[in-house]
Image (cartoon, grey):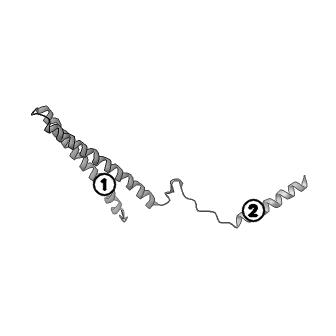
Amino acid sequence: MEKIKNVFLKLNSILAVALAQTEAPPVTPPGGYSTVGDIHRLLMNIVKWFVAFLVLGSVIYIVLAGWRYVTSGGDEEKISTAKTWLTYGIIGIIIAGLAYVIPRIIFNFLGGQAGY
């Protein structure tokens, strides 16, 4: 039993010396986002996709409002609905523009360089 214990102690000391001489690989967080710039780029990509979908939805809404207006046949209720849809579509485009601009203004105000 003593011989087995001595063998394990020798193996342990050899492994300790071998491991002490190697450098540990750099650790990166899951997803590959290791710097603030990477996280900023991720958030800006999310904002860009959000803005793209919002603009697309708003344009579709405006086109449908135009279609409702053209096919209203003079009915005041349908014309009113079409004008409301047109207003909401324009508001959607304005919100999309603000969603695109506000993060850039904040980032530049905080001292970052907008390189996108």
Residue under the point 85% across and 58% down: 7
| Secondary structure state at the residue bearing disc 1 | helix
> Viewer-proximal residue, 74 or 90?
74
Residue carrying label 2: 16
Identity of the amino acid at label 1?
Tyr
> x and y percent of residue 26 in the render?
58, 62
Q: Is 73 positioned to the left or the right of 25 in the image?
A: left
- Residue 100 badge: 1
> x and y percent of residue 84 in the render?
18, 39
Residue under the point 13% across and 32% down: 77
Q: In what quadrant of the picture does the C terminus appear?
A: bottom left
> Viewer-proximal residue, 32 or 62?
62
The answer to whether the residues at label 1 and label 2 have Cβ atoms under 8 Å apart is: no
> x and y percent of residue 40 in the render?
41, 58
Q: Residue furthest left?
A: 74
Identity of the amino acid at label 2?
Ala
Residue under the point 90% across and 52% down: 1
> x and y percent of residue 112 in the render?
37, 64
Q: Is 36 positioned to the left or the right of 101 in the image?
A: right
